[in-house]
Amino acid sequence: MSKKIGIGILSFGLLAIVAFAAAACSDDGDKAVPARQVASVAGAAIAAPTNPGPAQVSLGDGPAGVSGSRFTDPDVVVNLTADVIQWEVLDGEFVEVWAYNGQYPGPEIRVKEGDKVRINLTNNLPEATTIHWHGLEVPNDQDGVPGITQPDIPPGGSWTYEFVAPKPGTAMYHTHSNTFVQLSKGLFGAFIVEPREGLPQYDREYTLLLHETGGFYTINGHSFPKTLEDSLLKIKTGERILIRMINAGQLHHPMHLHGHQFTVVQLDGNPLTNPLVVNTQDIAPGQTVDVEVLGTNPGTWVFHCHIIFHVTNRGVYPGGMLTALDYEDHTSYFEQ
């Protein structure tokens, strides 16, 4: 869908309601990487292993931060670097962000329940850093809080995290050093734990990370209209899709979908016994919300934060946290 179409959507819809490329794959030191292990790739999600068998977990008690101290046979290996980069949040608009593997947000990490996970972090920042596994019940010495569970990782240093992936759900990872600065600059990413038996059947699945940096309100690192290039939600009539929303910023974001009700099925990675049916769901800082959408009303529908200032770019409206749900089997009014 073109930018012209996206802006047309705004004038027709939003105004009417008042308002993994830079980093390369690497193996774990000089060790051979088993077939089920997955190395990080900038610009792409890190996929879960496909072996459906139960994990045989054997945890060691070696020193934290040393590769192989908890287990020698990881199912998933991820290599991350933390770097300072210039990021194009809008066409021609660059901001300095601190990024994992050269991307903002960092690459999505996807594993299966019970997987033994090893994550190697190399710190290329001008200051110390760590990683916290937000929403994941990991051993205390893997929690990533400097001065409490581990030392800070100095510039040029490295650290290895090892833990068994807990219950399924949507979570995230983010820095926990100088968090006020480092998190606002972009050091975070999605961490998805899939059920061992596989996900429920969805026709499509999307992950939207909400954040604010440099005067911009972003979805997956971009502000409208650039969100229509990489965060457009596609659907067909009759399909059922899952949208995972993660608020990695410091503000509340009530996300509203035009033309539909959606069903909130998980909060903070926990399934709801009584799912909520709404069309606007507030997402608090640090919270994750999973919603299901049924393709019942063909069209091109705006999906945006309903705090109208959050759909601006450095105060200029329209922009910010806005994308669209676009039916592939429907011709938009603006395309006729």
Image (cartoon, helix red, strand yellow):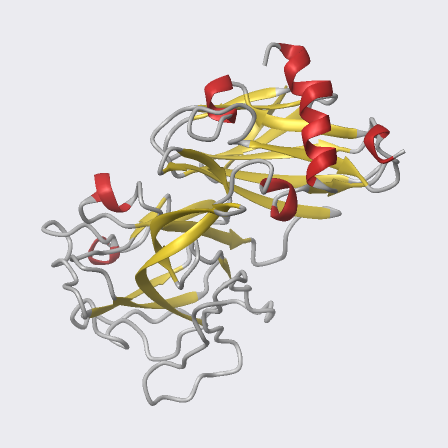
Q: Which residue occupies the foreground of this view, 241 or 177?
A: 177
Q: Quadrant of the N terminus?
A: top right
Residue 319, position in %: x, y? 54, 30
Q: Which residue occupies the foreground of this view, 204 or 187?
A: 187
Residue displayed at 64% across by 15% down: 15
Residue displayed at 42% across by 58% down: 165
Q: Report if residue 151 is visible in the image.
A: yes
Residue 249, position in %: x, y? 37, 35
Q: Which residue occupies the foreground of this view, 170 or 11?
A: 11
Residue 254, position in %: x, y? 50, 22
232 left or right of 290 in image = right
Q: Is residue 107 above or below residue 287?
A: below
Residue 224, position in %: x, y? 57, 35
77 left or right of 122 in image = right
Picture quarter containing residue 243? top right
Picture quarter containing residue 123? bottom left
318 left or right of 145 in image = right
Q: Report if residue 201 is visible in the image.
A: no
Residue displayed at 27% across by 50% down: 175
Please tell me how many numbered marks the rendered image carries.
0
Q: Which residue occupies the foreground of this view, 32 or 199?
A: 32
As drawn, which residue projects farthest toward the front?
Answer: 92
Residue displayed at 16% across by 57% down: 127
Q: Quadrant of the C terminus?
A: top right
Q: Is residue 297 above or below residue 232?
A: above
